[in-house]
Amino acid sequence: MTVTAEPEAAAGAAPTESAAPDVPFEVIPLSGNLGAEILGLDLRTLDDGEIAAIRAAWLHYKVVFFPGQDLTPREHLAFARRFGEPTEGHPVIPGLADQPEVFQIDYTQARELAAAYGKVGDVSRGLHWHTDVTFVKRPPLGSILRAVEVPRAGGDTLFSSQKAAFDDLSPALQEFLSTLTAVHDGEDQFKIVLDLVGEGRWEGKTFTKLEPVEHPVVRTHPETGKRSLFVNPGFTSHIKELKRAESDALLAFLYQHSVRPEFTVRYHWKAGTIGFWDNRATQHAVVGDFGDAHRVIQRVTLRGDEPR
């Protein structure tokens, strides 16, 4: 089934892009500004035309989901390679022993490890809003998740369109933000882990200390040419050109604005689902509402470019 209709924007939200791509499979939009399920494909047997169509849908919807795929870790990685070059699973946290490009997200395991070091209170059952790994010079292009074990209730992931958030700002504020530079730093979140593991690795290089990096507050998407906010409460430290009090106030506004409900979609995982998001134009957060239930997600991350 080919889908060409544009999803209707939520009331008061910034307009979505002009037209949804014409693709040779069924697409079910999930909200007015981002998110869609793609049905009727086997991700193991895609031809080049189908890969190109998936990429077009992904660029348009910013996060797409493929239910019922049940890929193995090797098949997951092979699918990711059709869209770019996989990075190390994470700059600081090691990936799977036999497949270092696959990063396993398991909060039960993380809490057990933290408890061994007396840090159990520091591990949440969810993650706050963030864009992945913006504390490196070239943050990831995107990530592809594979739901391995899903709680019976809870454990959803929220995604927010940073393009829609930017479009909704006044032209004067858009212009001002486009002159600013943000400092991103992973020290607060990952210094303890880095000290434990001894060294990290990213883009083939090892490091023992996380150094702050600078990115534009507003970045231009290298494939679509659209502008998006590119600050997040997970890793953005401050705005370089402003006094700290000014920076704190502006960032607090942007953090609240950028995840307003009309810019977001909430997705409930099922085991076997594959999810693929554009890390250059979104934020995401895990809803920590699944209590002590076991939740295991595996992630493959694609190498990105330096934000401009």
Image (cartoon, rainbow, N blue to C red):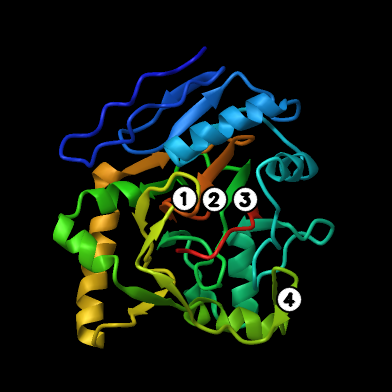
* Residue at the limit of the structure toward the right, as seen here: 98
Which sits earlier in the primary sequence, circle 3 or circle 4?
A: 4
Depth check, mark 3 against mark 2: the one in front is 3
State the residue position of label 2. 293
Task: Locate residue 107, reporting x and y percent.
Answer: 57, 60
Residue 235: x %, y % from top left: 44, 72
* Mark pair 3, 2: CA separation: 10 Å
Q: Looking at the image, do the residues carrying marks 1 and 3 touch, with CB atoms under 8 Å apart? A: no
- The disc label shown at residue 205, or none: 4
Upstream in the sequence, badge 4 or badge 1?
Answer: 4
Determine if residue 124 is in view: yes
Q: Where does the C terminus fall, quadrant-wise? A: bottom left
Q: Amino acid at mark 3?
A: Val
Cβ atoms at labels 1 and 2 below 8 Å apart: yes
Amino acid type of disc 1? Phe
Circle 1 residue: 290
Q: Residue at x 49, y 29 (%)?
A: 37
Name which residue lies at 15% across and 61% down.
172
Q: Around disc 4, counting alpha carbons within 10 Å, would you say few (fewer than 14), some (14 to 19), or many (20 or more)?
A: few
Of the pair 156 and 186, the residue shown nearer to us: 186
Kindly report the distance in space between the C-alpha atoms of the residues bearing marks 4 and 1. Answer: 37 Å
- Name the residue that disc number 3 marks: 296
Label 1, label 3: how far apart the Cα atoms are: 12 Å
Labels 4 and 2: the sequence-earlier one: 4
